Image (cartoon, rainbow, N blue to C red):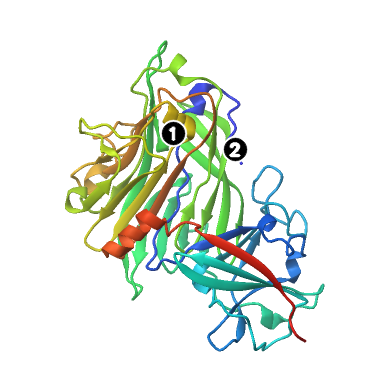
Amino acid sequence: MKWMYPISFVLFLIFPLSLKSKGLGTTTTSTPIILLASTLKGAEYSQIPDMRLFSVDNNGNIYPILFQIDQKDDYGDYVLGGPKSLTFNDFDELVFMSEDAGINKDPTHWPFQKPERLYKISLTHLGKKKSVFLGVYAKGKAPKESLSTKKGYVNLDLKNAKVETSKYLYFFNPKNYLMLKDFYTFDSNQSKKKLITASSFYLKLNLKYFFAISVNHSDVNSELEAYKVGPIRAIARVDFSYRLMSMKMNLGMYTEVVFFENSIFLPAILENPINSESILNPGSDFYYGFALVENPAQVEIKSNMAAYTGKEKTKKENLYWLSTKGETSQVYLEFKPSPSMLQKEIFPKYYSEAKTGNQVLKRAEKARPLGKSGVNIAVTADMGKLPTGEHNIELAIYIGNKLTNEENDAFKNHRSYKTYVSSLELSSLVPKK
């Protein structure tokens, strides 16, 4: 999937350059597991309506679990609004949650009809060996008992502009789906607590031969093109337009927002047609940040990025991270620049301001630099040296309510909120009739 830029370099740069967020809100280390059809040899080219996913308990009983199959087209975009075919192949994705995977044991008892083919998927996730079983039935022969009756993990409510799971409640701006309005997490008693009260991005184009241009989230609108809601995740494809005074211009840009029970994905590939150094001066700053409810001065902040207000420079890393630990919650954020950005030494910094979310929101409407904007914590970088070409850039966000050092270290060292499978083994079993 790509964001296409048919207009000009100036319009190319008005959108947040680093959005691919993962990980909002969980109280466990459960993770969405995403397996490509091409990695499931033998099961590839099966018919999707005849596929089922199972786990096994300690007594050898097999039972159905929730899963989802999402197909992709030749451009790598999700097929929304109807299947491209009924065949599971190429880059189609089989998705389930790690918490639903059972013990690493073969089934000995079937309470329903066995499938024609059975594949054991053994995976090591965060140091634990687990298994699920992919069953393929003869056409039209799968019994209804082979499907899980468990409630789906994600509810996308477009009418009320919200996404709700057992882990979080996310209110988005219907004029811009990438900008959240309010974000809550739920504790074990399902009591909610607001963590974030707004998000924003900003870009200043410090042009060499023209006046400087500043834009923020209020200058960009989005429209829902298509969506899909399944038992594991919801996917929404949105297009974007830019408003310059009274003119509305379609940017030819889009992204696909994916909501899981405990994470949110915004994948993006950037394609820069012009070398920024030829038309931009230094100081062409970009940031993406949040209005945290709590004052950042009251939370513990750790990072391998240098502070925006300090003299220290950020060192070259393949992955940059920031963690904040407050009274009842924590935020873990990662930023991964493209290799060419690292080569050009475009290294990010983190920004924090000793004001509450309500205080900074009073100045949120206009495009303003850090210190005068509607965010109190952000990741920022100078894009004045962004080179020509394609850039894979990620901004990954995890928000949870566990406060243990072990949990915080797990986010940082194992990236546990992400799709993380350290080993995968697929074996074919022949169910005994």
Q: In the rendered image, which quarter is residue 374 located in?
A: top left
- Counting from the top left corner in percent of width and height, residue 174 is at 48, 48
Residue 219: assigned label: 1
| Residue farthest to the right, as pictured | 139
Determine whether 351 is above or below 296 in the image: above
Name the mark nearer the viewer: 1 or 2: 2
Residue 419: image tag: none
- Three-letter amino acid code at the position of disc 1: Asp
Q: Nearer the viewer, residue 334 or 164?
A: 334
Name which quarter of the figure residue 38 lies in.
bottom right
Residue wearing tag 2: 2
**Residue visible at 44% across and 17% down in the picture:** 277
**Helix, strand or loop for disc 1:** helix
How crowded is the residue under tag 2: few (<14 C-alpha within 10 Å), some, or many (20+)? some
Q: Amino acid at mark 2?
A: Lys
Instruction: Note whether residue 279 is visible.
Output: no
Kindly identify the residue that appears in the image at 18 percent across and 44 percent down.
354
* Residue in front for this viewpoint, 159 or 63: 63
Please name whichever residue, 290 or 63, is drawn nearer the observer in this view of the structure: 63
Residue at image coords 46%, 20%: 276
In the displayed structure, 188 sits above or below 239; it is below
User: Which corner quadrant holds the N terminus?
Assistant: top right
How much space separates mark 1 and mark 2, taking CA atoms? 21 Å
Q: Earlier in the sequence, mark 1 or mark 2?
A: 2
Find numbered disc 2 in the image and state the secondary structure of the residue it sits on. loop
Q: How many marks?
A: 2
Residue 96: horizontal and vertical position, in percent? Answer: 57, 66
Quick check: can you spot residue 134? yes
